[in-house]
Amino acid sequence: MPDLFDMLAPAAESMAEGAMLLRGAALPYEKDLLAALGDITSQSPFRHMVTPGGFTMSVAMTNCGAAGWVTDRAGYRYDRNDPGTGRPWPAMPKCFLDLAVDAATRAGYPNFRPDGCLINRYEPGARLSLHQDRNERDFANPIVSVSLGLPATFQFGGLKRNDPVKKYALRHGDVAVWGGPSRLFYHGVPELKDGIHETVGRMRINLTFRGAL
Ligand code: SIN
Ligand code: FE2
């Protein structure tokens, strides 16, 4: 049986210097996050973007906040507008911001104030190959990454693409934070296994908070 300490402060695991995995940190926000997500996607729906090389991504994406991450034949970048609607991305909901600041603070980044959140939707079979998050202006900001829905494997490597990767099972409510010496570490998610999550359904949702602009 978990003792009171475990219930108040869910486990934190170190993934690397500057990188923490906060198990269950999003659970207190779950209902608010899912409701806010519905508002966001009714304004800026999920879509499969195209890489500069011409591949359609298996992960569907949208964004909220001042800056949204986009890719098309012209390249990867942040845009204040949703290219699909021509309008600004939906505002970042307060519960998104509160969770991101709370998790970053617990991981040692108390000054983090994200201005963008990339929202990834993985359906069974979707994957994100190893990459660095490097389109942001200031790498002093960490990345805060929230997992909801079906479980996934998170691959977390090093500064070089061929550095060995560690694998972590990310479950509903887990939050990964990486910054400082691990800010530019390669990471990815192999093919999502099929399943049904009791509240989120047949998908995994990932919220990735950035200081983009
Ligand atoms: C990302 O790197 O943008 C997403 C990582 C994840 O889905 O956990
Ligand atoms: Fe990433």
Image (cartoon, helix red, strand yellow):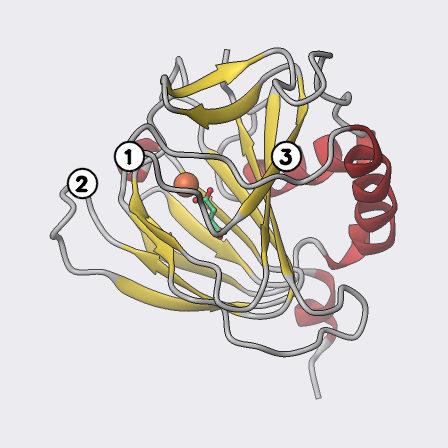
Q: Say few, some or many: other residues with alpha carbon within 10 Å of mark 1 (under 14 / 14 to 19 / 20 or more).
A: many
Q: Viewer-proximal residue, 38 or 16? A: 38
Residue at the spot of label 1 = 184
**Image quarter for residue 76?**
top left
In the displayed structure, does residue 22 sit left or right of residue 169? right
Q: Position of residue 11 (x, y in %)?
A: 56, 65
Element marked by disc 2: loop
**Image quarter for residue 65?**
top right
- Tell me whether the residue at label 1 lies in contact with that at label 2, contact meaning CB atoms closer than 8 angstroms: yes
In the displayed structure, does residue 26 sit left or right of residue 73? right
Number of marks in the rendered image: 3
How far apart marks 3 and 1 lie (CA) works out to 22 Å
- Which three-letter amino acid code belongs to the residue tagged 2? Leu
- Which three-letter amino acid code belongs to the residue tagged 3? Thr
Element marked by disc 1: loop
Residue at the spot of label 3 = 62
- Tell me whether the residue at label 2 lies in contact with that at label 3, contact meaning CB atoms closer than 8 angstroms: no
In the displayed structure, does residue 70 sit left or right of residue 43? left
